[in-house]
């Protein structure tokens, strides 16, 4: 089955700096890659997703890149703000099953 | 907006009790899922359902069962709660095919 690895598990950045979270996957059948943000005590919420026919997608300060050949995808947050502090999960969807990474706890230091 | 609700935010039960966790979604989603979330382990799939009366085991089904009598409702049952089932339980729903999961607020279950 699919194996999704996510790094780093914790990340601290100064406000205004960029943050990058990386995920790798093993199943070449995976072709949908969402990212979720979970604030403390709240539900995971979709923040951005990418399908395998696209290499990059941006939404304001958030971007996701996908390298199908290398089987990795990354979340980029620019100009980080304290409200970006949360746990971020990546996922890979093979069409039959969704596989989540183990999460990255991001802290933005004011 | 999709709304997924769960019957309780916090629940405390004793070892051996039968526990019911209810999940309701209002977007006519065919797919519904139960996950448990533990520190360092991420989200692990317990059971899922692609249709009424249908259920499939996920990665960690032992000690759990589910029921889906209506499209909008998916119940997770702990037949005899144990302390190792203390966890955050998240329900989710989605349309068929490759689409995002929409999560409920979670139920933090403590088994003493």
Image (cartoon, rainbow, N blue to C red):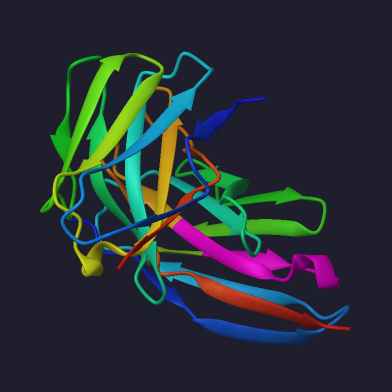
What residue sits 60% from the left and 47% below the top? A45
On whether residue A89 falls in the magenta region, the answer is yes
Can residue B96 be seen here? The reply is: no
Q: Is residue B99 left or right of residue A96?
A: right
Residue B31 spot, x, y in % from top left: 34, 26
For the C terminus of chain B, the quadrant is bottom left
Q: Is residue A9 left or right of residue B38?
A: right
For the N terminus of chain B, the quadrant is top right
Residue A41 spot, x, y in % from top left: 61, 60
Q: Is residue A63 left or right of residue A80?
A: left
Question: Magenta residues?
Answer: A74-90
Residue B60 spot, x, y in % from top left: 17, 55
What residue sits 38% from the left and 33% below the top? B22
Residue closer to the observer: A64 or B1:
B1
Residue A68 spot, x, y in % from top left: 40, 57
Residue closer to the observer: A75 or A13:
A13
Can residue A92 be seen here? The reply is: yes
Residue B13 appears in which quarter of the rendering?
A: bottom left
What residue sits 48% from the left and 59% below the top? A90
What residue sits 45% from the left and 32% below the top? B99
Q: Is residue B102 left or right of residue B12?
A: right
């Amino acid at each position: 089955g699919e194996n999704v690895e996510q790094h780093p598990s914790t990340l601290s950045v100064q406000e205004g700096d960029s943050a990058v979270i990386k995920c790798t996957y093993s199943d070449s059948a995976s072709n949908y890659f969402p990212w979720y943000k979970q604030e403390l005590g709240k539900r995971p919420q979709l923040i951005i997703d990418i399908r395998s026919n696209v290499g990059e997608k941006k939404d304001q300060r958030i971007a996701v890149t996908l390298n199908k050949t290398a089987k990795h995808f990354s979340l980029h947050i620019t100009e980080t703000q304290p409200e970006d502090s949360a746990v971020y999960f990546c996922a890979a969807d093979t069409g039959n099953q969704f596989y989540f990474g183990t999460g990255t706890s991001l802290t933005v230091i004011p | 907006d999709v709304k997924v609700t769960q019957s309780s935010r916090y629940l405390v039960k004793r070892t051996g009790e039968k526990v019911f966790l209810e999940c309701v979604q209002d977007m006519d989603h065919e797919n519904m899922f139960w996950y448990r979330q533990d520190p360092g382990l991420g989200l692990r799939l317990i059971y899922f359902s692609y249709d009424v009366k249908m259920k499939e085991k996920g990665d960690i089904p032992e000690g759990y069962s589910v029921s889906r009598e209506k499209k909008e409702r998916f119940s997770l049952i702990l037949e005899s709660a144990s302390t190792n089932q203390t966890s955050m339980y998240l329900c989710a729903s989605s349309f068929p095919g490759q689409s995002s999961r929409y999560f409920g607020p979670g139920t933090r279950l403590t088994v003493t």
